[in-house]
Amino acid sequence: MLNDQELLRYSRQILLQHVDIDGQLRLKQSRVLIVGLGGLGSPVALYLAAAGVGELHLADFDTVDLTNLQRQIIHDTDSVGVSKVDSAIRRLSAINPEIQLIAHRTALDEDSMAAAVAAVDLVLDCSDNFSTREAVNAACVAAGKPLVSGAAIRLEGQLSVFDPRRPESPCYHCLYGHGTEAELTCSEAGVVGPLVGLVGSLQALEALKLLAGFGEPLVGRLLLIDALGTRFRELRVKRDPGCSVCGTAHA
């Protein structure tokens, strides 16, 4: 049940007929893995903690750098040189002491990734490289766990939801395959801070919809964001029956 402090803390959310007490209880009982606590993971973690998701598993092997602070809003100047996980835990604990925070401070290999994904109800990929996204996707497909995936670089962002519980849902590999372009990082190509905040906030929203059970998630749809012109475009994405990760031949 929700205690009096929780009823007060989440009252504005509970007022929504799409959430109500039942939805808030589902959030409290949910476990979520956030892979990456940078520009995308910062708003994701902040909003999910504030919304009352009961257990957040935080995965990042990096430490806070001064160049991160332009966009990674969960960290502050005093956190420079500190583990991103520890920096995030400090901030999230201050925002909401009612939730549980589980730390993953080292890089996740195939086995530890599989175990981390199996331990939660939903995964948010907030990483900044293709190999990690591929590994997260494969683990989610294998475990049958929904994945909210976001990306942002320069002045462009992308967002989609991959849900292997739904037979019509594609996976990340259906959409991107093995990748066709050399990877670029924010340190090489640059990125504007509010863009990653926007994509991360939308990831958090999609996660809340899936966990509390309301609205229409971005399953089978890819949202493209053009920050330069403030334009949003949506593409339909179909499952690839021959996908080497989720295709019928590999099911």
Image (cartoon, rainbow, N blue to C red):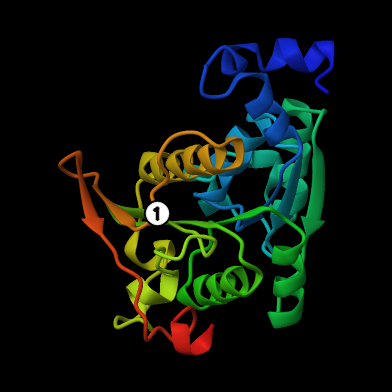
Q: Is residue 123 left or right of residue 109?
A: left
On the question of residue 86 being in view, the answer is yes
Tell me where residue 14 appears, x and y as whole percent: 61, 16
Please report the residue visible at 39 percent of the width from the left and 64 percent of the height from the top.
Answer: 168
Q: In the rendered image of this protein, does residue 232 appear above or below residue 94? A: below
The location of residue 20, given as percent across then percent down, is 61, 19
Identity of the amino acid at label 1?
Val
**233 to 144, vertically: above or below:** above
Rendering coords of residue 22 (x, y %): 67, 25
Q: Residue at x 77, y 62 (%)?
A: 105
Q: In the rendering, at what x and y percent does residue 188 appear?
A: 37, 68
Q: How many marks?
A: 1
Above or below 235: residue 15: above
Splitting the image into 4 quarters, where does residue 242 fall? Answer: bottom left
- What residue is disc 1 on? 219
Q: Residues within 10 Å of mark 1 (few under 14, many from 20)?
A: many
The residue lying at 41 percent from left, 45 percent from top is: 199
For the C terminus, the quadrant is: bottom right
